């Protein structure tokens, strides 16, 4: 039996199942506005395609399973939910509605929700581009994908990292439908490599929120600020907000938290130890999609800051009750109020603690463990200024003997 992710040829899509329409690829591209390979009138765009509903077939379990990328978003065209072909008709007949529910529940956790959201946005953008060109979005031709990526780079100034996400989204959709991946074609790969060489791989780095910056924030966080209405906060409101800001920055530094990890924390994840320090359980993270979890140290100062804002909250409540975007915004505003300037974000506490650890001599392997990095690339990038004085040239100048002198006789 072909697996749920099994491939099917483009011709197989047209007629492997007796109840399938005669040309499924044509219907999919009709939904994207393309008239290529079809006698039906073309649609004017994605909005027209969205309104064009395909009949649901209860005997096709894949209509449920393939919804991992599209069914959550009603604005996406239903023709993308068509059932891909299988080598034998019995493949479909042997699967029940219960099988569909079980598979759908697992497939929805194949990748993270944020990845699906990003792929959905990128796919919609590519489908809209294909509509304007009268081209097929599914299956897409490699030259069309290459031209699309080149246009985003050359005319819109999108960075290579963004282009790679767009290509990954296009590849994911094609893989989900058992179609050949156009992004594996040499032309698409050359396009991505060319964009990377022209723009370089360096990305803008958030300023590190170091121990010194933390002190500045702690000293100013509880001072009243002007609100959106132009009015100053009351002393009580400023104290409450400032206490949360201090606890937030302290905990994100101690645990080297990503904003998504911080937003997901509940009070049940924090345990107090007899010496006043704490242990924080990070249940799941970007580099731990399987949920093995990690336990990290929390300083007594941070535990005291957390205790001051809990106010008897139950263990199941989230610690900060903030979204990732709200966390980033609060850190940015706290840094500005402290006179630290622009460039701070939700990533700054993590970067700053990495820089502080490198400054006191913590080596890269230990730094990777503390920050839960799987690759040394990013921590090495964050701490390159702090580790420069431990490089080969720095060692040369600290050497006790002038190397221009002849070696000592033995």
Image (cartoon, grey):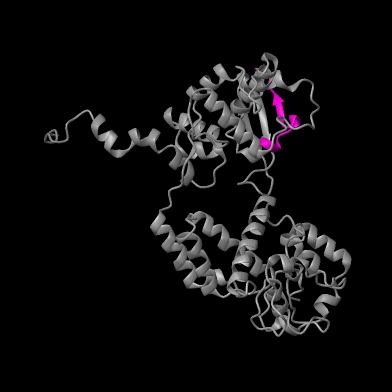
Q: Is residue 321 above or below residue 308?
A: below
Taking the image as shown, residue 237 lies to the left or right of residue 340, namely: right
Q: Residue 272 magenta-drawn?
A: yes
Q: Is residue 143 above or below residue 297?
A: below
Comparing 97 with 155, the one in front is 155
Residue furthest to the front in view is 230
Q: Is residue 36 above or below residue 369?
A: below
Q: Quadrant of the C terminus?
A: top left
State which region is magenta.
Answer: 262-275
Q: Is residue 263 above or below residue 28?
A: above
When asked about the image quadrant of residue 97, the answer is: bottom right
Q: Residue 130 magenta-drawn?
A: no
Comparing 199 with 189, the one in front is 199
Residue 31 percent coordinates (x, y): 71, 72
When asked about the image quadrant of residue 173, the answer is: bottom right
User: Looking at the image, which residue is at 51% across and 47% down?
Assistant: 375
Q: Quadrant of the N terminus?
A: bottom right
User: Looking at the image, which residue is at 88% across and 69% down?
Assistant: 96
Residue 180 percent coordinates (x, y): 61, 74
**Residue 263 showing in the rendered view:** yes
Comparing 290 with 189, the one in front is 189
**Residue 253 showing in the rendered view:** no
Residue 401 percent coordinates (x, y): 19, 30
User: Looking at the image, which residue is at 83% across and 60% down?
Assistant: 102
Comparing 95 with 65, the one in front is 65
Taking the image as shown, residue 172 lies to the left or right of residue 380, namely: right
């Amino acid at each position: 039996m072909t697996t749920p992710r099994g491939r099917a040829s483009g011709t197989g899509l047209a007629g492997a199942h007796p109840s399938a329409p005669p040309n499924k690829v044509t219907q999919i591209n009709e939904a994207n506005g393309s008239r290529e390979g079809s006698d039906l009138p073309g649609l004017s765009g994605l909005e027209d395609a969205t309104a064009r509903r395909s009949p649901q077939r209860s005997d096709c379990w894949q209509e449920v399973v393939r919804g991992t990328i599209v069914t959550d978003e009603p604005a996406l065209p239903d023709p993308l939910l068509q059932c891909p072909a299988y080598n034998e008709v019995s493949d479909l007949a042997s699967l029940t509605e219960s099988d569909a529910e079980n598979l759908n529940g697992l497939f929805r956790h194949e990748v993270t929700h944020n990845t699906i959201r990003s792929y959905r946005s990128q796919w919609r953008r590519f489908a809209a581009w294909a509509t304007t060109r009268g081209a097929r979005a599914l299956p897409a031709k490699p030259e069309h994908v290459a031209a699309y990526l080149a246009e985003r780079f050359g005319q819109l100034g999108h960075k290579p990292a963004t282009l790679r996400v767009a290509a990954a989204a296009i590849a994911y959709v094609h893989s989900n439908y058992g179609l050949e991946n156009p992004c594996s074609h040499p032309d698409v790969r050359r396009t991505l490599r060319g964009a990377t060489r022209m723009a370089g791989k360096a990305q803008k780095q958030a300023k590190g929120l170091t121990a010194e910056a933390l002190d500045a924030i702690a000293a100013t966080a509880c001072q009243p600020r002007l609100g959106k209405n132009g009015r100053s906060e009351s002393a009580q409101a400023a104290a409450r907000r400032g206490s949360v800001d201090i606890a937030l920055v302290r905990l994100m530094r101690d645990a080297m938290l990503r904003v998504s990890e911080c937003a997901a924390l509940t009070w049940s994840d924090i345990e107090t130890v007899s010496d006043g320090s704490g242990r924080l359980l990070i249940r799941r993270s970007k580099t731990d999609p399987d949920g093995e979890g990690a336990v990290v140290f929390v300083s007594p100062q941070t535990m005291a800051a957390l205790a001051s804002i809990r106010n008897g909250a139950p263990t199941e409540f989230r610690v900060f009750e903030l979204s990732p975007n709200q966390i980033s915004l609060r850190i940015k505003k706290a840094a500005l109020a402290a006179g630290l300037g622009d460039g701070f974000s939700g990533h700054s506490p993590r970067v700053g603690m990495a820089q502080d650890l490198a400054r006191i001599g913590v080596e890269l392997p230990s730094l990777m463990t503390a920050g839960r990095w799987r690759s040394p690339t990013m921590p090495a990038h964050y701490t390159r200024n702090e580790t420069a004085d431990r490089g080969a040239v720095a060692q040369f100048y600290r050497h006790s003997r002038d190397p221009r002198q002849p070696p000592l006789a033995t």
